[in-house]
Amino acid sequence: MAPSIISKALPLISQHEETSDFSLTVAPFIHHFFELPSRLLSIKSLDGLRDVYLDTNPVISAFAFSLLVAQIAFVVSTINKNYSQIDRVWSILPGLYNAHYWYWAKLTGIRSQRLDVLAIFSACWSARLTFNYWRKGGYDKGSEDYRWKVVKSRIPNETVWVVFNYVVISLFQSVLLFFIATPFYILVLGSRIQPEIISRDALFPQILSVLLVLEFYADNQQWEFHLAKHKYQRTAKVPEDWDAKDLDRGFNTLGLWQYSRHPNFAAEQAIWAVIYEWGCFQSGSIVNWTAFGAFFYLAVFQGSTPITENISSQKYPEYKEYKRYVGRFVPKLLGPKWDDYLKAQEKKNPIADATPAKGADKLRGSKKLR
């Protein structure tokens, strides 16, 4: 028999279809949110903290934590005038929420291979993205996403900016990171009914693994390109295994980047869409309440990527041509490709040393990535 704590903090359901029903699985526990502050203040020992943790529905406690993060981010950003506070935890919070669901389930006696697999994947995703953010200087003192300055320049009224900082940058983004992890809750509920991973279920972690590898390669190709470009700019010498034409262009069009203008963003969005679909598959639903996270996560990329590209178009004259020939996220299937554009340019401006450098050819993928 399951521990009695489950009946207090989880719904009593017996069918997979019920696991995605908000009115059954979340709404009955909303009162936990309003009781949580007084219960936390009454804690006098670690055992008391554990009791509060287990007696509170995991979605409610995760949501409350996201609100706390939002308040901290707003206060810190207001004091420091640095609006990348949520950016610094962007790669950490979703993995933390998934770890929370996994740990809560474990403590309450819910054991499942499905939960173990997704928890391990989330840890790998978080570690990889955090490392990439760190090596780009994201955690350096004073570091801030350059796009916030662009956004702030479009909102000259200080009062409006303060409201925008609180509602959008701090609150919305923090709550969004909570929501993209909510499919894990559906998997927790479903694991009470069927703990084992079935054959069709196993497809999801395989897809997620492929997407994570693609994102890793895309980010690493971008990192290597910019290292070479900055070295070229400092020394006025083309680094070994690189082509001056590619570096002079100023932006990466090699490897995966010749097929997608943002292959890393494409993989990132797909990861959370697949996790959402895993919850749908588990519950037998086409759409459920956790779609809020996946939908708005994708919407953030649709809104922020044009800002990035407008800046790139102003910095790099050839970027507008790049946009014509290469899809933003998904490769273009019809019409001329980036290679066709390069060949046309070579015919217009013949270059004596037409043989590409070894490293550039490797990244471009003309032989090894196709």
Image (spheres, rainbow, N blue to C red):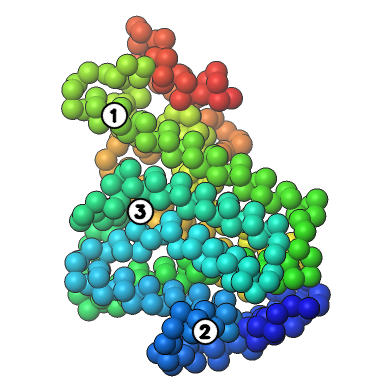
Query: Is residue 288 visible in this depiction of the protein?
Result: no
Could you tell me the amino acid type at mark 1?
Lys
Category of crowding for the residue at label 3, using alpha-carbon neighbours closer than 10 angstroms: few (below 14), some (14–19), many (at least 20): some
Horizontal side of 168 relative to 144 (left or right) equals right
Quadrant of res 273: bottom right
Mark toward the viewer: 1 or 3: 1
Quadrant of res 23: bottom right
What residue is at 37 percent from the left and 31 percent from the top? 224
Percent x, y of residue 226 = 32, 33
Calculate the distance from the C-alpha at mark 2 to the C-alpha at mark 3. 44 Å
Please give the residue where the numbered disc 3 appears in the rendered image.
Answer: 307
At numbered mark 1, what does the secondary structure look like: helix, strand or loop? helix
Percent x, y of residue 198 = 80, 55
Compare residues 189 and 18 and report the one nearer the observer.
Answer: 189
Compared to residue 102, the image places residue 336 above or below, namely above
Could you tell me the amino acid type at mark 2?
Val
**Earlier residue among tags 2 and 3:** 2
Percent x, y of residue 214 = 54, 39
What residue is at 65 percent from the left and 74 percent from the top? 108
The quadrant of the image that shows the C terminus is top right
Horizontal side of 82 relative to 4 (left or right) equals left
Quadrant of res 26: bottom right
Number of numbered tags placed on the structure image = 3
Please give the residue where the numbered disc 1 appears in the rendered image.
Answer: 229
Compared to residue 170, the image places residue 369 above or below, namely above
Horizontal side of 332 relative to 44 (left or right) equals right
Please give the residue where the numbered disc 2 appears in the rendered image.
Answer: 52
